[in-house]
Image (cartoon, grey):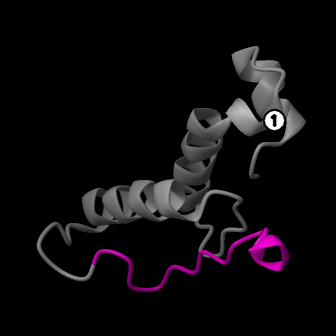
Amino acid sequence: VSNKRFIGDITGVRDPERRTAGTLGANVSALALGARIFRVHEVRPAREALDVAWAILHGTLGGDAHQGLTVPAADTHRR
C-alpha cells in the first residue's frame, strides 16, 4: 500500500512522496489483519514500524520482532 492514492484521500496529502506516515499506518493495519509480505518504497521506516507492531501484537518485545515478515523494497531498481 506504499504511498497509494487512498492514503492521500484519507490524509489530505496529495504528494505521494509525503505519505510515509499514512503508509506506515496502513501497513501496520494490514499486519494486524494478517498480511505478512509488504512492498514499500521507504524500507527503514516500514521495517521499524512493522517490527514494533509485530512485537506488540505477538508479545515478542525482547525477542526476534520481525520473524515471519518480509519487506522487499519497491524501488530496488533505482538504488
Residue 7 inside the magenta-drawn segment: no
Give the image quarter of residue 3: top right
Indicate whether 27 appears above or below 22. Answer: below
Residue 37 falls left or right of residue 3: left
Indicate whether 76 appears above or below 19. Answer: below
Give the image quarter of residue 33: bottom right
Q: Is mark 1 on a helix, strand or loop?
A: helix
Tell me which residue sits at (52%, 51%) in the image: 28
* Quadrant (top left, top right, bottom left, bottom right) of the C terminus: bottom right
Residue 64 falls left or right of residue 73: left
What span is colored magenta in the figure?
65-79
The x, y position of residue 5, in whole percent, is 88, 34
Q: Mark 1 points at which residue?
A: 16
Give the farthest residue toward the left. Answer: 62
The x, y position of residue 58, in whole percent, is 29, 68
Residue 38 falls left or right of residue 48: right
**Residue type marked 1:** Pro
Mark 1 is surrounded, within 10 Å at the Cα level, by few (under 14), some (14 to 19) or many (20 or more) other residues, namely some
Tell me which residue sits at (60%, 52%) in the image: 27
Q: Which of 59 and 23 is in front in this view?
A: 23
Q: Which of 29 and 42 is in front in this view?
A: 42
Give the farthest residue toward the top. Answer: 12
User: What is the magenta segment's predominant secondary structure?
Assistant: loop
Give the image quarter of residue 9: top right
Tell me which residue sits at (82%, 71%) in the image: 78
The x, y position of residue 42, in whole percent, is 62, 57
Indicate whether 58 appears above or below 77. Answer: above
Residue 68 inside the magenta-drawn segment: yes
Give the farthest residue toward the right. Answer: 5
